[in-house]
Image: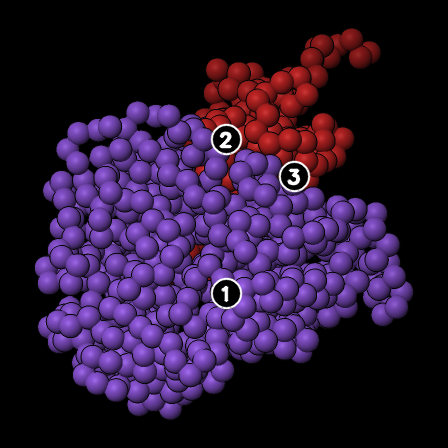
């Protein structure tokens, strides 16, 4: 009896769902694979640092040793193994980036939604505030925050979050502006749904996809911003393993010793490359308007 | 978006050469008679009574003269503003005959009243022209009872008791003679409007940018060879080295030893070296528990492998220190055996203290360090990280607190630290200058007091006072040895290192001699056209 039904491959069944369509598109893209691989690699390094690192983060084993089998990336001015420090550095860098972007989303998304949904005065007020925030060079905002608090990782994370809030709020507002005029939104309002319901239930799904893309792309630059601030000496303890402070320490000896700078430098570049590739591909994959196959 | 741009640079620098080069602008346009001296930090003030900072002193010795000074090459005392002097009343009175016709930068003439004015300003708390100068060196001059002018060019000092260090201390920069009319005119702003009798006068000072000195045509020794001297502060060691190589600076000091080793032998550069009369040490604030407990301080002492520290942070250029007075100086504590590096012993000591006082291990302390290089610590951050790791091994969790050097020493004076990096270069080559200045109880105060550990030993105080009064060298040596033994037993500080002073200069700089006192005296320097 069943034989009358056509033989449908499982993938085709799933293909009706947007998520699986996105996943398929994502999987076939080589730069997506590269990006995902890089991001996964660094996440793994961060998670498994104590097991993967060949030495302890503060273990001393001779100063400025060139790369060798004992020390793949050499040792630095504090006698630390550079590879170990880079692996442990992934923790602080990734976590700081992740936390600051999450903070930015938590603050920026509601602001953007409210501005876009209510329009009028609320919109004008919020958007002007954001324009003002964007008019300041982001490094200046970061300086202000770090100076107001004591130097440390918390102010660095807050500063980076603050830099990203306006970007996220603006993007979310743009999405909400186009979405709120759509029929299904109007319909739900006509049915008497509360503002809260419309914003959190009806509009949120439309906002979600661009937000993921933006956060992924933002994560790369947030990691860079964290590294930049700690490079400038605004980070926490001078001896913490973090890519920016590793570079800062290494630059003092660049004229005589090069290798302590190579590890953290390459790590920063690769992580950001990873997040950027991932973000670009996510944008294509999650955009409902580009529904064709490549 | 500047951060982005900056981060781009950071990323590009990812490993390579860019990172350091951004900071400093090139030197101002110079002619061949301008000398550029690049160092780690700027001066703090040019009032000789208001500072104890080496970078300031380097400028002061070119702006001011003292009554007596060091020979051009040696540490012998020779006449300067005073032509001659004689001692009377068994060392209780000293009469100085001033050089006639010496002009200050502001056009006034040096006379006995001017000298009296300066010493009253140094000695008297309620002198009407003090203008808030902190006088950190006051205790070095407290043997003076009175100063009076006994003729237009004759000054008589009366001492409370005979003093072996008096004449030496007159050669120190706090005894510089400032124009009294400049003090009266500029009052609190004297620090940026100095007027002395020195070979150079201040031309311009852009704070943290540069200090420009101009030759003083009417200097009593004759006009110096150079037209101008520019001091520029550049904190990054690697940039200072680069400036020198590129010819953007003529002299630079406080470079890390590894950097100097790399520069040595490069054509066009010369390295000058002197046995350093200095000490780098770790101060332990004894008023803050648990550092008031001797065992805790001893535990810290035993936890530090000084030789390894010197290998790491000085590339081996330095010798381990047992006591403040450097071995190159008389009065050094010969035969004093250093405590062994013994982390196990540290752990035991800390465990005993923890049991005794009901403390939980690990103990928590902060460690203050300066961000800029000092002559005795070219890489303070390296040292701080080293000490943090060493102390962590034995059960002390250390939080590193970096500070700009100006705040650093202010905060240490005020006793805000648990542990702190500090050091000293002698001003007058007398053990008194190390022991009395750094560890006598009269030097404990919140405004520039140099007893950073707040070590208040009455016994040491008495020994040091006695040594000041004693004129016999052998007897003084004995007293200083006793004092150092006592200090060693009480361990208010951990002496770490005595390091050699090395400066790097362009070969075309001639006539500049790195003096054993490390004073930067540029009067005889000139810039030749060729290279050697």
Which secondary structure, mark 1?
Answer: helix
Same chain for mark 2 and mark 1? The answer is no
**In whole angstroms, how far apart are the C-alphas of marks 2 and 1?**
42 Å
**Chain B shade in the render:** purple
Q: State the image quarter where residue B101 is shown.
A: bottom left
- Residue A261, disc: 2
Indicate left or right for B207 with A157 as reference.
Answer: left
The residue at which mark 1 appears reads as B433
Q: Nearer the viewer, mark 1 or mark 3?
A: 1
Which secondary structure, mark 3?
Answer: helix
Residue A173 visible? The answer is no
Output the chain of dot 3: B
The residue at which mark 3 appears reads as B308
Q: What crowding class fits label 2: few (fewer than 14 Cα within 10 Å), some (14-19), or many (20 or more)?
A: many
Q: Nearer the viewer, mark 2 or mark 1?
A: 1
Output the chain of dot 1: B
Indicate left or right for B237 with B230 as reference.
Answer: right
**Chain A shade in the render:** red
């Amino acid at each position: 009896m069943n034989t009358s039904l056509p033989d449908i491959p499982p993938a085709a069944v799933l293909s009706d769902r947007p998520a699986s369509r996105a996943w398929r598109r994502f999987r076939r893209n080589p730069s997506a694979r590269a990006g995902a691989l890089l991001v996964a690699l660094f996440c793994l390094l961060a998670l498994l640092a104590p097991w993967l690192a060949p030495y302890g983060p503060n273990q001393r084993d001779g100063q400025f040793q060139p790369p060798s089998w004992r020390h793949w990336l050499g040792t630095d001015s504090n006698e630390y193994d550079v590879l170990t420090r880079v692996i442990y550095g992934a923790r602080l860098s990734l976590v700081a980036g992740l936390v600051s972007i999450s903070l930015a989303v938590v603050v920026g998304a509601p602001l953007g939604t409210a501005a876009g949904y209510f329009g009028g005065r609320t919109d004008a007020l919020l958007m002007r505030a954001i324009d003002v925030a964007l008019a300041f060079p982001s490094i200046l905002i970061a300086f202000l925050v770090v100076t107001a608090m004591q130097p440390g990782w918390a102010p660095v994370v807050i500063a980076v979050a603050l830099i990203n809030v306006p970007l996220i709020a603006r993007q979310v507002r743009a999405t909400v502006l186009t979405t709120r005029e759509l029929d299904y939104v109007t319909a739900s309002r006509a049915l008497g749904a509360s503002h809260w319901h419309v914003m959190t239930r009806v509009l949120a799904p439309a906002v979600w996809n661009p937000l993921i893309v933006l956060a992924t792309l933002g994560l790369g630059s947030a990691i860079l911003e964290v590294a930049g601030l700690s490079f400038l000496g605004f980070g926490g303890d001078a001896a913490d393993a973090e890519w920016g402070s590793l570079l800062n320490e290494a630059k003092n000896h660049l004229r005589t010793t090069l290798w302590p700078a190579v590890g953290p430098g390459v790590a920063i570049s690769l992580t950001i490359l990873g997040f950027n590739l991932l973000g670009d591909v996510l944008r294509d994959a999650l955009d409902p308007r580009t529904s064709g196959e490549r | 978006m500047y951060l982005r741009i900056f981060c781009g640079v950071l990323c590009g620098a990812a490993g390579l050469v860019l990172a350091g080069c951004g900071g400093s602008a090139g030197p101002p346009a110079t002619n061949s008679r301008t000398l550029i001296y690049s160092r780690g930090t700027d001066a703090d003030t040019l009032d000789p009574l208001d500072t104890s900072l080496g970078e300031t002193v380097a400028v002061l010795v070119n702006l001011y003269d003292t009554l007596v000074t060091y020979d051009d090459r040696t540490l012998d005392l020779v006449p300067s503003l005073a032509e001659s002097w004689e001692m009377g009343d068994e060392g209780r009175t000293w009469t100085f005959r001033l050089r006639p016709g010496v002009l200050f930068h502001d056009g006034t003439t040096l006379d006995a009243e001017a000298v009296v004015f300066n010493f009253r300003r140094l000695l008297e708390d309620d002198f009407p022209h003090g203008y808030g100068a902190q006088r950190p060196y006051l205790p070095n001059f407290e043997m003076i009872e009175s100063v009076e002018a006994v003729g237009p060019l004759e000054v008589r000092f009366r001492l409370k008791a005979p003093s072996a260090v008096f004449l030496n201390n007159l050669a120190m920069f706090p005894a510089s003679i400032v124009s009294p009319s400049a003090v009266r005119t500029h009052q609190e702003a004297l620090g940026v409007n100095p007027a002395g009798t020195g070979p150079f006068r201040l031309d311009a000072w852009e704070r943290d940018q540069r200090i420009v000195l101009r030759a003083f045509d009417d200097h009593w020794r004759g006009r110096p060879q150079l037209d101008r001297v520019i001091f520029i502060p550049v904190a990054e060691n690697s940039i200072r080295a680069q400036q020198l190589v590129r010819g953007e600076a003529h002299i630079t000091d406080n470079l890390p030893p590894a950097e100097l080793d790399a520069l040595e032998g490069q054509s066009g550069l010369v390295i000058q070296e002197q046995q350093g009369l200095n000490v780098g040490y770790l101060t332990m604030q004894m008023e803050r528990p648990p550092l008031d407990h001797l065992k805790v301080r001893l535990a810290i002492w035993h936890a530090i492998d000084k030789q390894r520290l010197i290998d790491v942070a000085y590339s081996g250029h330095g010798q381990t220190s047992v006591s403040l007075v450097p071995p190159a100086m008389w009065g050094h504590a010969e035969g004093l055996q250093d405590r062994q590096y013994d982390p196990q012993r540290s752990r035991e000591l800390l465990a005993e203290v923890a049991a005794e006082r009901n403390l939980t291990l690990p103990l928590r302390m902060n460690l203050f360090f300066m961000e800029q290089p000092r002559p005795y610590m070219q890489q303070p951050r390296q040292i701080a990280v080293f000490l943090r790791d060493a102390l962590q091994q034995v059960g002390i969790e250390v939080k590193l607190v970096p500070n700009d050097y100006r705040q650093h020493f202010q905060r240490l004076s005020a006793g805000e630290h648990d542990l702190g990096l500090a050091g000293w270069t002698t001003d007058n080559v007398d053990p008194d200058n190390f022991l009395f200045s750094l560890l006598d109880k009269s030097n404990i105060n919140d405004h520039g007091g140099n007893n950073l550990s707040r070590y208040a030993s009455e016994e040491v105080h008495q020994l040091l006072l006695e040594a000041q009064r004693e004129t016999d060298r052998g007897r003084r040596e004995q007293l200083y040895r006793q004092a150092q033994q006592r200090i060693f037993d009480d361990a208010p500080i951990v002496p770490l290192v005595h390091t050699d002073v090395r400066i790097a200069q362009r070969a075309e700089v001639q006539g500049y001699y790195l003096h054993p006192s490390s004073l930067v005296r540029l009067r005889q320097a000139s810039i030749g056209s060729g290279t050697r």
